[in-house]
Image (cartoon, helix red, strand yellow):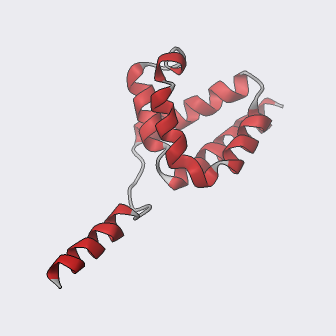
């Protein structure tokens, strides 16, 4: 009976979301990523893409690890790794979308 309780507790922890606060560095990186998107005039496609893959944010962050050799040209190695880690959190997608929309509206 104790073993089953350990397994159940392990699954509760494995699928837990939220609870972690973003650090100031993480917020700065999200703003930098939003700037990158808006400067290239791809705000609308980026928001549509983020909205459509919202349930798959963890898979997307893991695919960033795969594409690291190509995409790391735009960010430092530390920043790229941090972005991949913070995109695992569900609330970050909403924050990124809001930042992109805010910056795109102020640019117009």
Give how far across and how far down residue 77 sits, in percent.
40, 21
Tell me: residue 92, above or below residue 35: below
What residue appears at the point 41 percent right and 30 percent down from the top-left corner?
81
Q: Quadrant of the C terminus?
A: top right
Q: Quadrant of residue 78?
A: top left
Name the side, left or right, on which 50 lies relative to 58: right
Q: Exactly how many numbered labels are in the figure?
A: 0
Q: Quadrant of residue 32?
A: top right
Give how far across and how far down residue 40 sits, in percent.
73, 21
What residue appears at the point 52 percent right and 54 percent down from the top-left corner?
90
Question: Can see residue 94?
Answer: no
Name the side, left or right, on which 14 lies relative to 50: left
Tell me: residue 77, above or below residue 103: above
Question: Can see residue 41?
Answer: yes
What residue appears at the point 47 percent right and 17 percent down from the top-left corner?
69
Residue found farthest to the top:
73
Give how far across and how far down residue 35 sits, in percent.
64, 28
Residue found farthest to the left:
2
Observer-nearest residue: 7 or 90? Answer: 7
Q: Quadrant of the N terminus?
A: bottom left
What residue appears at the point 77 percent right and 36 percent down from the top-left corner?
45
Residue found farthest to the right:
108
Give how far across and how far down residue 82 sits, in percent.
41, 34
Name the side, left or right, on which 40 lies relative to 17: right
Tell me: residue 37, above or below residue 94: above
């Amino acid at each position: 009976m104790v073993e089953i309780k350990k397994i159940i507790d392990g699954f509760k922890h494995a699928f837990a979301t939220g609870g972690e606060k973003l650090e100031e560095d993480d917020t700065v990186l999200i703003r930098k990523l939003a700037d990158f998107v808006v400067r290239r005039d791809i705000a609308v496609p980026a928001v549509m893409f983020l909205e459509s893959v919202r349930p798959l944010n963890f898979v997307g962050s893991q695919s960033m690890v795969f594409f690291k050799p190509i995409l790391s040209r735009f960010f430092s190695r530390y920043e790229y790794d941090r972005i991949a880690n913070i995109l695992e959190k569900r609330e970050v997608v909403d924050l990124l979308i809001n930042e992109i929309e805010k910056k795109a509206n102020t640019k117009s």
